[in-house]
């Protein structure tokens, strides 16, 4: 797992591995593998030493990948860290893979089951990968942000004259969020918010 903390107007990322044992191969076994006279014993020691080196190397690789991918996520989602859920960008595994040099499958393995502690709470790394709300692609605003803004509008509406889906779409357009009335209705339904006619109070 990783942590993210504010520092001098930005953020720094650190690995939270202080509670884990740090593996190291005892030099004694390297010496034994080089000096052992019995061929079978020498072969056994070299095989086990190779397996141990592979294990340590894999752990180091995974830690390096976790740190690099977390740093990339923090850089790309800084607006969310600064201002909250209404400012999250859409993000894909492919984009992080291209920026970090890892494969998409490696990025996917790293973000599953690893968590980041941030000033806004603890999130699984996969949380930061969000679908776009518009056709802007990987750099557009995230669906979760538009849904958050939509819910805010409805909470603040006049209960005697609630907003229609088209009115919500028009207001979002003024905030440079271009989605259709149909998409507003879809998001509203996914949030379990009733249509205008059923929200209106007498």
Image (tube, rainbow, N blue to C red):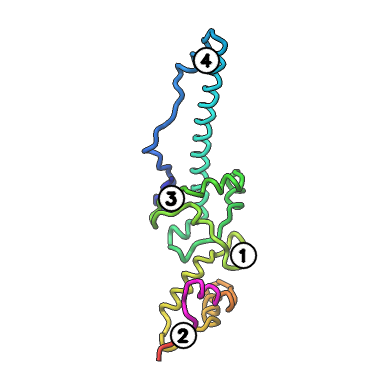
**Residue appearing at x 52%, y 44% in the figure:** 68
Mark 2 neighbour density, 10 Å: few (under 14) some (14–19) many (20 or more): few
- What is the CA distance from the residue labelled 4 to the residue labelled 2? 78 Å
Closer to us: mark 3 or mark 4? Answer: 4
In-image side of 22 versus 183 (left or right) = left
Which numbered disc, 2 or 3, marks the residue that appears first in the sequence?
Answer: 3
- Measure the alpha-carbon separation of dots 2 and 1: 33 Å
Cα separation, mark 3 vs mark 4, equals 41 Å
Contact (Cβ within 8 Å) of mark 2 with mark 3: no
Q: Secondary structure at mark 3?
A: strand
Above or below: residue 199 compared with residue 143: below
Instruction: Give the residue pinned by disc 4.
Output: 33
Q: Which numbered disc flags the more N-terminal residue, 1 or 3?
A: 3
> Which mark identifies residue 116?
3
Q: State how far apart marks 4 and 1 are (Cα).
A: 58 Å
- The answer to whether the residues at label 3 and label 4 have Cβ atoms under 8 Å apart is no
- What label does residue 198 carry, if any? 2
Q: Residue furthest left?
A: 19
What span is colored magenta in the figure? Answer: 185-197
Residue 193 belongs to the span the image colors magenta: yes
Say which element carries label 4. helix
Are the two marked residues, 2 and 1, in contact with CB atoms closer than 8 angstroms? Answer: no
Please state, as top left, top right, bottom left or bottom right, where the N terminus lies in the image: top left
Mark 1 vs mark 3, CA separation in Å? 27 Å
Q: Marks 2 and 3, how far apart in space?
A: 40 Å
Residue drawn at 50 percent across, 62 percent down:
88
Helix, strand or loop under label 1: loop
Comparing labels 1 and 3, the label whose residue is closer to the camera: 3
């Amino acid at each position: 797992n990783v942590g993210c903390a504010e520092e001098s107007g930005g953020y720094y990322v650190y690995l939270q591995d202080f509670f884990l044992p740090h593996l190291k191969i005892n030099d004694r076994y390297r010496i034994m593998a080089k000096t052992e006279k019995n061929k079978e014993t020498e072969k056994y020691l070299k095989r086990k030493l190779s397996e141990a080196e592979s294990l340590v190397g894999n752990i180091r690789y995974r830690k390096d990948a976790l740190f690099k991918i977390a740093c990339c996520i923090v850089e790309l989602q800084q607006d969310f860290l600064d201002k909250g859920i209404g400012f999250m960008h859409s993000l894909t595994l492919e984009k992080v893979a291209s920026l970090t040099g890892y494969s998409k499958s490696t990025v996917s393995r790293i973000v599953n089951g690893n968590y980041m502690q941030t000033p806004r709470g603890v999130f699984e790394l996969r949380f930061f990968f969000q679908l776009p709300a518009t056709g802007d692609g990987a750099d557009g605003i995230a669906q979760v942000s538009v849904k958050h803004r939509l819910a805010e509008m409805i909470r603040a509406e006049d209960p005697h004259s609630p907003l229609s889906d088209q009115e919500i779409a028009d207001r979002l357009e003024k905030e440079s969020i271009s989605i259709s009335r149909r998409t507003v209705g879809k998001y509203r339904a996914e949030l379990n918010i009733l249509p205008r006619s059923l929200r209106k109070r007498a």
